[in-house]
Amino acid sequence: MNKTDLTIQRPKIEIGYRIGKLTVQERTPLYRHRYSVWKCCCDCGGEILLDTRQLQRATVRDCGCSGIKVKSGQKDLTGQRFGKLICLEPTNERGSSGGTVWRCRCDCGNECLAISTQLTQGYKKSCGCLSHPPLKDYVGKQFGSLVVMEYAGKRSGLHYWHCKCECGVEIDVGQTRLQSGQITNCGCKRYLARKQLSGEQKRRLALISSAGIQDYKPDGTNSDVSQSDLRSKPRELVDLTGRIFGRLTVIGFAEWKDDIGYWRCQCECGNQTTVRHGNLLYGHTKSCGCLQREVYQKNMQFVGGTSVRLIERRMESTIKSNTSGHNGVYLNGNGMWTAQITFKGKTYYLGSYSDIQDAVKARKRGEEMYERFLDWYYNGYSNVGDVAEGNKKE
């Protein structure tokens, strides 16, 4: 990841600055968490007081007239695109992990609900239309010995095409099997080959067929191949060697396992990986895993190994597994309430107390390191080089 990818440019808040339905009207003498408080006027005529950090993060976009607003610390996704989805507005619902549920419109015209983490981490890209293969125009095209004649309708969610083989037989073939090369004839070639075989060759063909190979030669030229070699040979797969899929370049066939072909691929990052044949063709796998990690780190705003978004979430909501009602506070085996806090991979002990309120106060004091880190993140650093220096100051 380049250093320039982490450069943060926060807008300068001044009179006339506009975000959503709000327009900054004037600066008040008040301060909130050491940030100036601004008086903002909404398009509906209402007024609201917001501090500089809230305006920079764009977590509040109206005075509350819409009835729904993005809570402080949560990212506003309004108008952003994720695949075929455009976020319209947040709802009052929350996902199982506490993420905001957004109402989105798909390019196909449908609307759906999606959790913010599913959108930002790339797990949801459509209303569901991408999970069904689109109908393609294959009329007149040839796949091996098959020529597509006409569309044969949809069965069990799959598109079928009526094809005519070179031998004259007409059959219906699934669109997926045509484009992946799984079926290239009506079966006549195998039938003709079987008729020419002797008894010994037929016995060998039965053995080879059980191993998943369809290109057995009836002239006996492959009679000396071992069973282990036969089982490792691919079955009528489209040769992907040299083709590029995202960051992956196919360098050769890897193995035939459980009736599925696997290819050995070289990623742009230098790693090698083995990928299923179908995952490459349909775009399900585009890297060795480095692409998903980079997207995750960018969306979670990792700085020096610390996620800004996770820290903000801890300060705004309670962890699902928490039983005390307060993050970092739990009842130990001695009946005392223990307070602790984790930051940059280290857990700090904040003391044990007989009263839970004392433990909560200790936790709040400990969260000051979160506040200092967030202040430094939003106002103090501009590139990766400042991260190490900022860690030393903490």
Image (cartoon, helix red, strand yellow):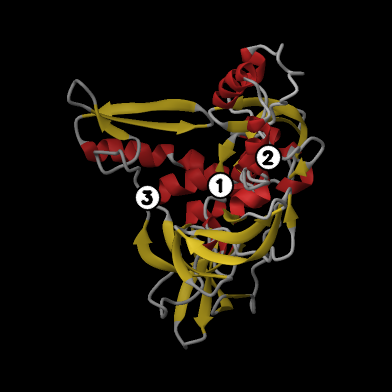
Judged by depth in the image, the label closer to the viewer, 3 or 2, is 2
Query: Are circles 3 and 2 on residues that touch, CB within 8 Å?
Result: no
Residue shown at the point (23%, 25%) measured from the top left:
332
Q: Is residue 382 visible?
A: no
- The kind of residue tagged 3 is Ser
Q: Which mark is residue 189?
A: 2
Amino acid type for the residue under numbered disc 1: Leu
Residue 150, placed above or below residue 370: below
Choose the circle earlier in sequence order: 2 or 1. Answer: 2
4 and 151: which one is in front?
A: 151
Is 46 rendered above or below residue 250? below
Count up the numbered dots. Answer: 3
Observer-nearest residue: 391 or 296?
Answer: 296
Residue 317 bears which disc, if any? 3
Q: 51 above or below 178?
A: below
Sequence-wise first label, 3 or 1: 3
Mark 3: few/some/many CA within 10 Å (<14, 14-19, 20+): few
What residue sits right under mark 1 in the picture?
374
| Discs 3, 1 touching: Cβ within 8 Å | no
- Can residue 258 be seen at all in this image of the molecule? yes
Label 1: which secondary element: helix
The disc placed on residue 156 is none
Horizontal and vertical percent position of residue 311: 49, 43
